[in-house]
Image (spheres, grey):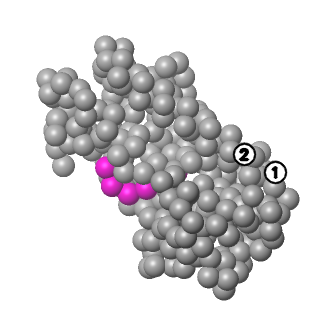
Amino acid sequence: MLVTPELLSSFPILKPLHHDVLSQLAQQSSVQKFARRGVVLRAGVAEEKVCFLFEGRLQGVDFTIDGREVGLYFVEPGQFCGELGLFDRGPQPEYIIALTPALVVNVPMEALREVMLANPGVVNILGARLAARVRQMTYQRSLLGLPNVAQRVCCQLWLLVPDKDKKKPQDSSISNPPTHMEIAIMLNVSRETVTRVFQKLQNRQIVKRDGTARLQVTDLLTLKVLAEGDKEL
């Protein structure tokens, strides 16, 4: 697959750039395929690229001192990762792995840094993305302190509900929901624990599986109450 200006412009952060700028970036960029669990970016390495996800799903992960994997955040199609080095030229802080087969566009770090410095709009988007990620990771860390494991799972699900639906009184859906194992990694619990919580949620008709690509949240209000700890599952 050839990297073209049109392909680069499909990513929201690059869409405002002039065609000539996109052409120059395209000439230096490459496409890379990853199998499930493939390592896209390595922690502790000064990576020389920013990765834009075209297909699939990625996850930022780290490891505890005793070797347990901890999930930090997800990367969805149209989003990017590895951008921290644009600002400090430092090493990649966490691993980025492919949760599904993935297609990634690699843009050289230095070339993108030059574009960033010449285009304030790109800096604004990068800054907003970094701020959102810090907020999400701070919230994620706060979940680990909840003593009630069922509440942790409900909080994680509430976090995945689209923002536009959170004010609705009835239902919503989560596209491409993480697996029970992926949620377990995010919350530092066992997969079996997550499965038991899901069984209770399904028995109470709060959530319902719609194949593997969608999770229906049929009772948003109750999920919110459980996430906030006002009631126990």
Q: Is residue 211 left or right of residue 151?
A: left
Q: Which residue is mark 1?
A: 145
- Residue identified by numbered label 2: 141
Residue 148 in percent (x, y) is at: 83, 63
Residue most toward the top? 118
Mark 2: secondary structure: helix
Residue 152 visible: no
Within 10 Å of disc 2 (Cα), the crowding (few <14, some 14-19, many 20+) is: some
- Going by the picture, which residue comes out furthest to the bottom? 203
Residue under the image location 41 percent in, 29 percent down: 125
Q: Nearer the viewer, residue 6 or 181?
A: 6
Q: Is residue 124 magenta?
A: no
Instruction: Tell me which secondary structure the magenta stretch mostly adopts.
Output: strand
Magenta range is 54-59
Q: Position of residue 7 (x, y in %)?
A: 20, 42
> Seen in the image, is 227 located left or right of residue 159?
right
Q: Secondary structure at mark 1?
A: loop
Residue 62, by quadrant, is top right
**Rendered residue at 16%/44% (across/down):** 2
In space, the residues marked 1 and 2 are separated at their CA atoms by 7 Å
Residue at image location 33% in from the left, 34% down from the top: 13
Q: Give left or right: position of 222 versus 89.
A: right
Residue 209 sits above or below residue 74 on the image: below
Q: Based on the displayed image, in which of its 4 quarters is residue 51 positioned?
A: top left
Local packing at callout 1 (Cα closer than 10 Å; few below 14, some 14-19, many 20+) is few
- Residue type, numbered disc 2: Arg
Q: Above or below — where is 8 with respect to 221? A: above
Q: Are marks 1 and 2 in contact (CB under 8 Å)?
A: yes
In the rendered image, residue 217, in percent from the top left (x then y), is placed at 55, 71
Tally the numbered discs: 2
> Is residue 175 something one can see in this rendering?
yes
